[in-house]
Image (tube, rainbow, N blue to C red):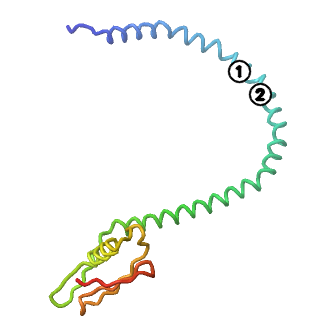
């Protein structure tokens, strides 16, 4: 036979105590039943009186708070609609941002990526002593027959890049 562990011993003691306490628990339930019933009988009129007295106050509170409640519900609905719209816009923007797009220009036997052209224009602009952070807008006009890209930076600085 296996040796009993401490846990097994504790479980045995708990079982013994529970079995010994059961008759006392039953006796307490039997004796407390009438006391509980008397308490219910005596407290019932008091509870009903309190509810009757509270009813006009609750009605007045409801009447006074009803416009605010309606306004909150209306604003909550507007806020929920705004959240849905923002969520939709964020999801769309995220999907656009996470989509990798490469744009190639092919002319005769020559091929170049549009991003490479933009990068070279930025490098030229910076080489002229400007800061990369100064570039807010970049417009590129590609002329493949001239192997050139004309550009306008921030609607004022212009240039030509040959590739």
Residue placed most toward the observer, 86 or 14? 86
Q: Which residue lies furthest to the bottom in this view?
A: 145
At mark 2, the secondary structure is helix
The image quadrant that residue 32 belongs to is top right
**Which of the two marks, 1 or 2, is nearer to us in this view?**
2
Q: In this view, does 57 lie above or below 131?
A: above
Give the residue number, with chain letter if any, for mark 1: 37
In percent of width and height, residue 101 lies at 29, 73
Judged left or right of residue 35, residue 162 is left
First in sequence: mark 1 vs mark 2? 1
Crowd band around label 2 with a 10 angstrom C-alpha radius: few (<14), some (14–19), many (20+): few
The residue shown at (52%, 63%) is: 84
Judged left or right of residue 50, residue 119 is left
Residue placed most toward the observer, 123 or 145? 123
In percent of width and height, residue 35 lies at 70, 16
Question: Which quarter of the figure is the N terminus placed in?
Answer: top left
Give the residue number, with chain letter if any, for mark 2: 44
Question: Which quarter of the figure is the C terminus placed in?
Answer: bottom left
The residue shown at (44%, 78%) is: 154
The image quadrant that residue 127 belongs to is bottom left
Judged left or right of residue 121, residue 92 is right
Residue placed most toward the observer, 60 or 146? 146
Q: Distance between the residues labelled 1 and 2?
A: 11 Å
At mark 1, the secondary structure is helix
């Amino acid at each position: 036979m296996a040796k009993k562990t401490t846990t097994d011993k504790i479980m045995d003691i708990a079982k013994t105590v529970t079995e010994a306490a059961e008759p006392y628990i039953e006796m307490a339930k039997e004796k407390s039943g009438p006391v509980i019933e008397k308490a219910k009988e005596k407290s019932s009129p008091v509870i009903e009186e309190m509810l009757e007295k509270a009813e006009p106050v609750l009605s007045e509170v409801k009447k006074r708070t009803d416009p605010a409640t309606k306004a909150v519900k209306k604003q909550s609905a507007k806020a929920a609609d705004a959240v849905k719209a923002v969520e939709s816009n964020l999801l769309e923007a995220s999907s656009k941002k996470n989509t990798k797009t490469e744009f190639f220009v092919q002319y005769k036997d020559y091929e170049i990526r549009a991003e490479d052209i933009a990068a070279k224009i930025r490098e030229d602009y910076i080489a002229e002593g400007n800061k990369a952070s100064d570039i807010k807008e970049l417009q590129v006009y590609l002329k493949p027959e001239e192997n050139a890209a004309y550009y306008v930076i921030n609607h004022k600085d212009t240039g030509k890049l040959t590739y």
